Image: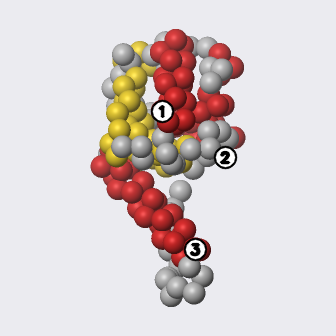
Amino acid sequence: MPIVKTWLVPDKIMLVDHIGKLSVEDFERHLEETIEMLDKSPGIVHTISTYVKMEGMPKGSLDQFKNLGRVMRHPKLGWSANVGLKPLFAFIYKIMMKTFGMKFAQFSSIEEAQSFLLQVDQLQAQTQKSEATPESDSQEPQKPVQ
């Protein structure tokens, strides 16, 4: 299968490897499976997508991907991190992510992306904890850089 999904951190961080040349059918199946995984997850899910082994994106217009908007707007989708995205695809991806109001970042390795996403989760947990206890003396967490 040209798109392989695995959990790096169960129900928290999903690794999505794009391998070989992708077809519209491959991409559509990937979107359907991603929606199902997000629906089943108990909380926010971040993704790390790798493109190092990808040989090409599916040909066709974005409206062929009927589930793309459902994934991008899914309430459980958190940050999207990319590794190995070629410059032209990175430009197109950046436009798409900004259009959907998504949080995204580019990284040089999976480990770097995972470390960032784990820090994001820690900051969110600290923020939620300090909001739940207004009299706590916790410090203001630094915002992650996008």
Residue 48 visible somewhere in the drawing: no
Residue to which mark 2 is pinned = 101
Residue at image position (52%, 29%) is 36
Tell me the distance, in whole angstroms, between the alpha carbons under discs 2 and 1: 21 Å
Residue 126 visible somewhere in the drawing: yes
The quadrant the N terminus occupies is top left
Q: Position of residue 14 (x, y in %)?
A: 40, 39
Q: How is the image coloured?
A: secondary structure
Please indicate whether residue 123 sits to the left or right of residue 60 in the image: left
Assign a secondary structure to mark 3. Answer: helix
- 116 above or below 45? below
Q: Amino acid at mark 2?
A: Gly
Do tag 2 and tag 1 residues touch (Cβ < 8 Å)? no
Identify the mark at residue 132; answer none if there is no mark. Answer: 3
**Disc 2 residue crowd, few under 14, some 14–19, many 20+, Cα 10 Å:** few
Residue at image position (48%, 41%) is 41
Q: Amino acid at mark 3?
A: Ala
Comes first in the chain, label 2 or label 3: 2
- Label 2 or label 3, whichever lies nearer to me, is 3
Tally of marks? 3
Q: Position of residue 117 (x, y in %)?
A: 42, 54
- Label 2 or label 1, whichever lies nearer to me, is 1
Assign a secondary structure to mark 1. Answer: helix
**Disc 3 residue crowd, few under 14, some 14–19, many 20+, Cα 10 Å:** few
Comes first in the chain, label 1 or label 3: 1
Residue to which mark 1 is pinned = 37
Could you say which is closer to the camera, residue 130 or residue 115? Answer: 130
Residue at image position (47%, 15%) is 26
Q: Position of residue 46 (x, y in %)?
A: 47, 46
